[in-house]
Image (tube, rainbow, N blue to C red):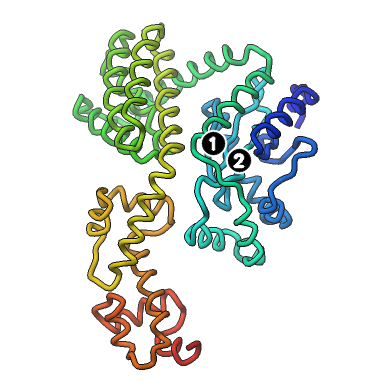
Amino acid sequence: MDNINYLDQEYMEKLLTNFSKATGLFIEAVDVYGKTFFTPKDIEMCEFCSYIRSNEEAIKKCEQSYRKACQEAFRWKTTYFFRCHVGLVMWSVPIIADNQNIGCIICGQVLLWKADEFFLDELKESTQDMFDFEIISEKVKKLEIISAEKCQSAAEMLLLVVNYLMRTNNNIFLEQRNRQYWRNQIVKEIEERKKGNKDKTFDYDTYFKRERKLLQYIRVGNKDKIIDFLPIIFTDIEILSEYNTEKIRLRSSELVVSISRAIVEGGLDSKLSIDKAEEFYKNVNACKSSEDIFLYLNNFILELVDDIFILTQNKQVSLLKEARGFISDNYDKNITVEDVADSVCLSSSYLSHLFREKLNCTVNNYITRVRIEKSIELMSMRELSIQEISEKVGFNSQSYFTKIFKRYIGVTPVIYRNKFK
């Protein structure tokens, strides 16, 4: 906590309080452990979060979310978007002064779309045994819903505010530190390859396979995988370029061409993609060393991934809504993942990724869940046998229906009907 003394507390309070009042967003400063050490005066936390933080166990989970967000923000020295442990969209901006990681400014506590049943399901699961869910469900309705554009603008404004707050030459220091980071990462990767006798037949075919994997991560906006994979890609580029800076510049520009196509497939506007690529080509020529190039390329890629995260949230929600609607209309048929994907013009692999990422389940699990829910609705119709109910909700076998029903509900269909219906 001693690092906090680097900050001009009075100046910070004035800046952040005005930022919060101007945007209407709650804001707080946390230390490297995720513990809050500052909140603006006269700015109240939303009812939902106030209720969450009335529980000691939930407070610990908040701090864990913030600590992880701080680590990522420190790692890349820029804004880090994340979802907290109860699913709210937030972002963290690192506070760094005199080469010391002090903490982060945390902002958000919002949603980018109206909470649906699956958000509530996830919320119930993450807060089980801690809260009265009826109360928490009512407070969810009061959460602020902001547009993706406002979210991005607020994050960028906050980054400017924090950078101004530091009032030091930190930017120069950070560039030097990040250059050294990439040099260390690449040297480490090369040494590990030598030690483990890796890549005995390393050539362009091996590199292109890795590049395709990176592009796949970029298309789906998997930032964690991208962060882990970039040192390997950069090492490949340096080796294939024979450690020549001009060749590295050329290979990096070629990679940007591929990335520009991938981010369009990931949801970014094609015009914006072209503009950013042209900006890269222009600015990369000013880089004087491989470290400068890799630092700039790293920041370029991660900025694009953040753009995809913000700009595709509503698009993904719309696609999921259409997919769920198709399932709701066709659950009684023998539908497959491919059928659902075709209905929304997506590949089955990308649709599966969306379901796992946003709904925390597979497409098949979701179809099964809908069928079980529909079967429960039919239980009150005594004229229907269990066999008929199973057929009406898309099961070909009564025994399999009974097995799945018990797995989801805890009892067999017969017991459920007799006891609860």
Q: Earlier in the sequence, mark 2 or mark 1?
A: 2
Determine the residue positioned at 57% across, 48% down: 88
Mark 2, Cα crowd under 10 Å, few <14 / some 14-19 / many 20+, is many
Task: Name the quadrant of the N terminus.
Answer: top right
Who's the residue at 54% across and 35% down the image?
150
**Which percent across, then down, holds residue 255?**
29, 23
Q: Amino acid at mark 2?
A: Gly
The vertical placement of 315 against 165, above or below, is: below
Disc sitting over residue 116 in the figure: none
Residue 308's place in the image compared with 279, above or below, is below
Measured Cα–Cα span from mark 2 to mark 1: 8 Å
Quarter where residue 401 is shown = bottom left
Would you name the residue on which mark 1 appears? 151
Q: Are the residues at dot 2 and dot 1 in contact (C-beta closer than 8 Å)?
A: yes
Which amino acid, by three-letter code, is at mark 1? Cys
Relative vertical location of residue 60 with respect to residue 223 in this rendering, above or below: below
**Image spot of residue 38 (x, y percent):** 75, 35
Q: Secondary structure at mark 1?
A: helix
From the top left corner, tell me how far across and down residue 165 is, in percent.
69, 20
Residue at label 2? 108
